[in-house]
Amino acid sequence: MKKIILISLACFLCWNTKAQQKTEQLGIEVKPVTLEFSATPGSSSVRKIFITNALSEKTQFTAYVNDWRRDTIGSHVFNEPGQDPRSCALRVSVDKSFFELEPGEKQELTVTLQEPLDSVDNLQMSWCMLFIETVKEKKIGGATGFKTTIANRYRVGVHIYQTPPGVTEKEIRLLKIEPLVNATNRYRLVCQNTGKTQLQCSGYIELFSLEDGSKIRIPSQEFPLFPEQIRYIDFKLPEQIAKGKYTLTGILDAGNEVALEAGQLTIEIN
């Protein structure tokens, strides 16, 4: 009988340095956790990553790539390499797909991206995820002689982004603001990246009281947004908010190079 304990330690958001620190503490150090490529058509580009075995014993590692996307709430959805039309997984290679490290030992991996000479990929951003995963297993024997094999697996995800030099357009759209069904005083901003590059965005809500003119700003939420991706950002209004009518303004900020997007609703708090 084989029991698998999978501990996924992928640093799925390259802006989350706390996730990277947590990964390092638990046994695998991978630096950097994001690789940015800007290869021109027909050329190849090389980056280096470094893996350190912070476990207490000799460990085997494997390296492989997968497709991935973020869904409407920001969760990661994985697929086999090359399935996604935005994937660059089949153009990415590593010089070592399997290696072994003693405790404290470090391994350098060379990651190469080959950009096609004539392809639609030259006109759009593409991405994939490179996983570094342990493959060591342990056998545990019981008093009755029954044995179980446990694979304590650690996995770290390295984001790989390829943005061709000519792909620079940045644009975001607020598609709608809507109350959440069966949820009191909760509202959703629905937005889409209509540009061609990944954006780091901030979304927030401001309330203006039509009764006394007071203003309330709901704390902003930070999130990345792939080209074409639609994202939901949900907000809960303060519980102590006074009854009455308000103008609710939803605002999206994708940085200095992108125009702010905003929309309004008139709501009533009962």
Image (cartoon, grey):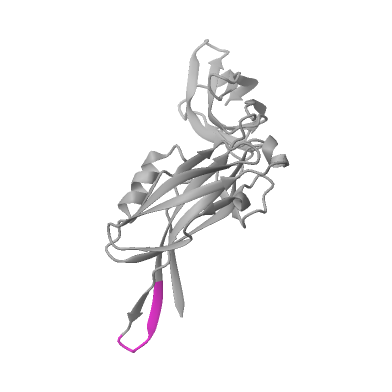
Which residue is at the front of the view, 32 or 221? 32
The answer to whether 221 appears left or right of 226 in the picture is left
Q: Which quarter of the rendered picture does the C terminus lie within?
A: top right
The answer to whether 8 appears left or right of 230 in the picture is left
User: Which residue is found at the position 66% from the left and 26% from the top?
Assistant: 173
Query: Residue 240: x and y, percent?
Result: 45, 27
Q: Is residue 18 above or below residue 77?
A: above
User: Which residue is found at the position 46% from the left and 50% from the top?
Assistant: 110
Work out which residue is located at the far bottom of the displayed protein and give it: 144
Q: Is residue 139 above or below residue 143?
A: above
Which residue is at the front of the view, 54 or 12? 54
Which residue is at the front of the view, 161 or 23? 161
Number of dots carrying numbers: 0
Q: Does the magenta-highlighted stretch encompass residue 131?
A: no
Residue stretch rendered in magenta on the structure: 143-150
Query: Residue 85: x and y, percent?
Result: 69, 47
The answer to whether 56 appears left or right of 41 in the picture is left
Q: Does the magenta-highlighted stretch encompass residue 146?
A: yes
Query: Residue 45: x and y, percent?
Result: 54, 42
Query: Residue 260: x and y, percent?
Result: 59, 19
User: Which residue is found at the position 35% from the left and 48% from the top?
Assistant: 22
Work out which residue is located at the far top of the displayed protein and give it: 213
